[in-house]
Image (tube, helix red, strand yellow):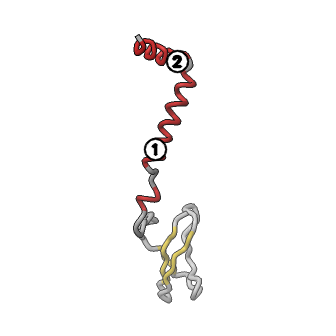
């Protein structure tokens, strides 16, 4: 749900309101009670990443990627059954002779 900026033309009260996109625009000012409230056009609800360390904490490490690749390759060999074992046998036989 986005956050909308509102300002009252009657008293000048400005505030942000967290509301659903399907909700109607608010008309009454919560401070003065007048029906002079209008919604401002803002920059939008962008995600802002502040501070150092964003890239270090939000992406997988190389060691994780390597272990995940090893797990997925070992999983493919067991599901392939004959094809995986056939390649291993033929490679082993040709290497021994």
Going 59% across and 83% down the picture, which residue do you hit?
A: 30
The numbered mark at residue 96 is none
Q: Are marks 1 and 2 in contact (CB under 8 Å)?
A: no
Going 55% across and 76% down the picture, which residue do you hit?
A: 27
Give the mark, 1 or 2, whose residue is nearer the N terminus.
1
Which residue carries the number 1 mark?
65
Going 42% across and 14% down the picture, which residue do you hit?
A: 96
As drawn, 87 above or below 40:
above
Quadrant for the C terminus in the image: top left
Tag 1 secondary structure = helix
Q: How many marks?
A: 2
- Classed neighbour count for the residue bearing mark 1: other residues with Cα under 10 Å, few (<14), some (14–19), many (≥20): few
As drawn, 91 above or below 39:
above
Q: Residue furthest front?
A: 96
Q: Position of residue 94 (x, y in %)?
A: 41, 12
Quadrant for the N terminus in the image: bottom right
Tag 2 secondary structure = helix
Q: Position of residue 28 (x, y in %)?
A: 57, 80
Q: Nearer the viewer, residue 51 or 72?
A: 72
> Depth-wise, is mark 1 or mark 2 nearer the camera?
2
Which residue carries the number 2 mark?
85
Q: Nearer the viewer, residue 65 or 33?
A: 65
Q: Position of residue 5 (x, y in %)?
A: 48, 74
As drawn, 80 above or below 8:
above
Going 45% across and 16% down the picture, which residue do you hit?
A: 92
Q: Residue furthest top?
A: 97
As drawn, 54 above or below 6:
above
- Classed neighbour count for the residue bearing mark 2: other residues with Cα under 10 Å, few (<14), some (14–19), many (≥20): few
Measured in 3D between alpha carbons, the distance from the residue under mark 1 to the one under mark 2, in whole angstroms, is: 25 Å
């Amino acid at each position: 749900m986005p956050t909308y900026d509102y300002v009252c033309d009657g008293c000048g009260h400005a505030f942000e309101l967290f509301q659903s996109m399907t909700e109607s625009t608010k008309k009454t000012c919560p401070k003065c009670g007048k029906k002079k409230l209008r919604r401002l056009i803002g920059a939008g609800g962008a995600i802002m990443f502040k501070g150092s360390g964003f890239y270090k904490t939000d992406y997988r490490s190389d060691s994780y990627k390597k272990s995940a690749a090893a797990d997925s390759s070992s999983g493919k060999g067991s599901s392939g059954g004959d094809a995986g074992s056939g390649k291993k046998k033929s490679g082993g036989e040709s290497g021994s002779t």
